Amino acid sequence: MIDAATTIENGRAVLGIEFGSTRIKAVLIDTDQKPIASGSYDWENRLENGIWTYSLEDIHKGLQGCYSSLKKDVKEKYGIVPKKLGAIGFSAMMHGYLPFDKDGRLLVPFRTWRNTMTQEAAEELTRLFDFNIPQRWSIAHFYQAMLNEEEHIDRVAYFTTLDGYIHGLMTGEKVLGVGSASGMFPIDSKTGNYNASMIKKFNELAASKGHPTDLWELLPKVLTAGENAGTLTAEGSLMLDPEGDLEAGCSLCPPEGDAGTGMAATNSVAPRTGNVSAGTSVFAMIVLEKPLKNVHTEIDMVTTPSGDDVAMVHCNNCTSDLNVWVKLFAEFAESLGADISTDRLFELLYNKALDADDDCGGLVAYNYFSGEPITDTAEGRPLLVRMPDSKMSLPNLMRTLLYSSLATLKIGLDILMKEENTAIDSITGHGGLFKTKGVGQKILAGAINAPVSVMETAGEGGAWGMALLASYMIHKKENESLGDYLRDSVFAGSEGETLAPDKTVVKSFDAFAKRYKAGLEIEKAAVMALK
């Protein structure tokens, strides 16, 4: 306690803040990279005029609310408030579209990763580049706006992602970490910058559409992990801490997306390592030792925070539908007068899934709150489907909901592991799906037929991973790579638990996946029928 207070008072503590889909979290770490305080702020995206968005007011209020929560935690634990920080890093859910004019005005509401409105642009750019461009990438949103002849398109002076926007508020710098930038536009891993030949092709395409464009001028500057990305300005410090306690002047590391912070938080930045982050969305990041043989629309090519190639399988939907069912059971328990905590209810219901029949009683569920490009589904309609003779039991329902949360991810990973024969030495799971000990881990191991590890630190999440990237910037040794820093200074001696795949679960999940894919037409019909 004394050491932590001294670290904070001396201005050596490092702060990481990550904007997740439903929660903004702050983690303050000491010089041993251990969390010493935290804060959070709950928020939710909204569907406005058919677009998933957060307003700038939401963003600013969430930023300040999260930092205020952190200050309160520091005050309660140590009797002080932070006056100065050693370094700061900001992260957010990757992708999306925030376009600004030359005066810094936002031209259209923030279009988040959750939107599936850019199929035409994504398909055309994928053909043009011979490189998969997912619908949620910033360049897909920009080009779709061009195809739609949206009024704002010729006034765009700059566009960025959420983490880039927040970093700009703090520093005035228009930059991104390479991992986050790789979700805006393809990166050339040899140069560590945007792919020059693809930018040339895009500029020529835009000119042919009557919208002369120079992407080099419109995209943020790309930086790699360890580089200094600017200094906290007086305006930035007041934006973060309106009470005025926090001094300006500390360094900020390159802002990163939640994929990059997940890699840092799970020590998964070296080739043949990978991680799965499972919360509102679910994605797997596999660091490649060699390029893929083919272009797959189910697989995104991004990078680590250091610029190494990563195969990413990203699914828009994971635990949202599962959480609704748990909330339903919570309402039932409350109606009975039962006093049960949310954590205990999740633990109880998750463990029930382990008692399910191997065939889940013939049930199948679709967890789609929003569209899912991997399965070519434009919108979401959460569904539970069964035959008249299906066995509807609590264990079968819970196993079905858990399988459904990972089924789309399995479709993408099967391509990597079975078609591309990608070598993977270790997979680490983190996020809400893994909070109940052993259950989500066992289901994921069965889904991918590979061992899955969960570290003791997995619960710290992306905000801690962002703090680690900021700490790396100020504490790294000369020529020390991010992978070496994480291995030697952060994870040396750390404990975790690895589960080998249960062959019964592997067989069960394979059968469920076959049923799931066969029933996708039901989901698509529901989208058409239920407007």
Image: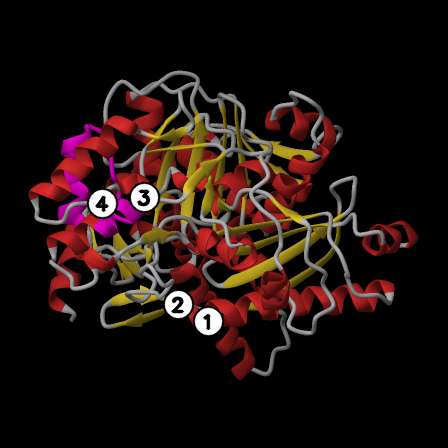
Q: Sequence order check: which comes first, mark 1 or mark 3?
A: 1
Vertical position of residue 320 compared to residue 183: above or below = below
State yes or no: residue 131 in magenta.
yes
Q: Is residue 412 left or right of residue 496?
A: left
- Give the amino acid type for the residue marked by disc 1 in the picture: Asp
Image position, residue 271 (x, y; %) = 49, 21
Q: Residues within 10 Å of mark 3 (few under 14, many from 20)?
A: few
Residue 54 - label? 2
Q: Are marks 1 and 3 in contact (CB under 8 Å)?
A: no
Residue 58 - label? 1
Q: Residues within 10 Å of mark 1 (few under 14, many from 20)?
A: few
Q: Label 3, on which residue? A: 217
Residue 280 image-quadrant placement: bottom left
Q: Are marks 2 and 1 in contact (CB under 8 Å)?
A: yes
- Note whether residue 313 is visible: yes
Residue at 36% x, 63% y is: 103
Q: Sequence order check: which comes first, mark 4 or mark 1?
A: 1
- Note whether residue 437 is visible: no
- In which quadrant is the N terminus drawn? bottom right
Q: Is residue 56 left or right of residue 437?
A: left
Mark nearest the camera among 4 and 1 is 1
Q: Label 4, on which residue? A: 375
Q: In whole angstroms, how far apart are the C-alphas of marks 3 and 2?
A: 26 Å
In the image, which residues are magenta?
A: 119-142
Q: In whole angstroms, how far apart are the C-alphas of marks 3 and 4?
A: 35 Å
Vertical position of residue 67 compared to residue 490: above or below = below
Q: Sequence order check: which comes first, mark 3 or mark 2?
A: 2
Dot 4 falls on a residue whose secondary structure is helix
Dot 3 falls on a residue whose secondary structure is helix
Q: Sequence order check: which comes first, mark 3 or mark 4?
A: 3
- In which quadrant is the C terminus drawn? bottom left
